[in-house]
Amino acid sequence: GAVVSQHPSRVICKSGTSVKIECRSLDFQATTMFWYRQFPKQSLMLMATSNEGSKATYEQGVEKDKFLINHASLTLSTLTVTSAHPEDSSFYICSARSGQGAVNTEAFFGQGTRLTVV
Amino acid sequence: SQKIEQNSEALNIQEGKTATLTCNYTNYSPAYLQWYRQDPGRGPVFLLLIRENEKEKRKERLKVTFDTTLKQSLFHITASQPADSATYLCALGIGSARQLTFGSGTQLTVLP
């Protein structure tokens, strides 16, 4: 299957600093990427939908100024957690689907990023 | 309110038996349903997709059923192995939306 690479896999940062997470589709063009957040033993919660070349669509309750998403190319989307606080500590996962018309298809997920804010 | 519920948080079974996991949903009309496997500290990996007009799908030792009347999907792993131990997530595809809505998962442990 297609490969989505997410980097870094783990990051520890100080409170108040910003952290950037990258999500790359390695062997296909992803017009749409999705960013999720997952707390222990809980479901993946969709944060935002990122479309190449346009502004991301954020889910209700997600602060767009805090979680900056950039999808500048068909193979790269980034999530920047700005002014991080300990409550932002979580597991962040990106996913991508290939093709614009392929609605009923599997999603390919990155390996996830464990963010710890101290 | 809309809900996706997976039968239990944890399920333990003996190696060689069939594991059956349940995904129930309310107030959704999904066009399709998917099952994913997630290992600790990793992103989910796609297993199977079943559409609303399909009753059953199989892939090797895996079988998925989809009953839109009961609003339920069953996920079966036959001849289970310790390597099948993981968290299994169901996800609904709603209409023309391209995002998935996930259940909270069932942690399966296959005991040797």
Image: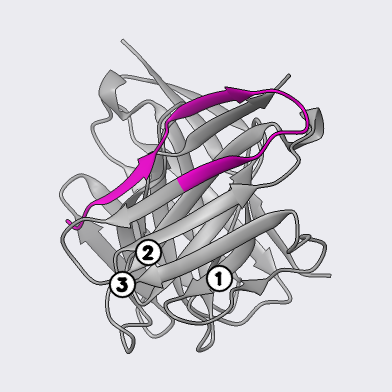
User: Could you say where residue B35 lies in the image, as x and y percent from the top left?
Assistant: 41, 55
Please report, as a chain letter, where disc 1 is located. A
Q: Residue at x 65, y 34 (%)?
A: A90
The one nearer the camera, B2 or A78, is A78
Give the vertical position of A6 relative to B49 (above or below): above
Find disc 3 in the rendering and name its residue: A74
Please report, as a chain letter, where disc 3 is located. A
Q: In the rendered view, does B106 fall on the left or right side of B88? A: right
Residue flagged by tag 3: what amino acid is it?
Answer: Leu
**Crowd band around label 3 with a 10 angstrom C-alpha radius: few (<14), some (14–19), many (20+):** some
Q: CA distance from mark 1 to mark 2?
A: 10 Å
Displayed quadrant of residue B51: bottom left
Pick whichever of labels 1 and 3 is earlier in the sequence.
Answer: 1
Q: CA distance from mark 1 to mark 3?
A: 14 Å
Q: In the rendered view, does A43 fall on the left or right side of B46? A: right
Q: Residue at x 23, y 59 (%)?
A: B58
Find disc 2 in the rendering and name its residue: A96
Residue flagged by tag 2: what amino acid is it?
Answer: Ala
Please report, as a chain letter, where disc 2 is located. A
Q: Residue at x 60, y 71 (%)?
A: B71
The residue stretch that appears in magenta = A1-21
Find disc 1 in the rendering and name its residue: A49
Q: Residue furthest front?
A: A17
Pick whichever of labels 1 and 2 is earlier in the sequence.
Answer: 1
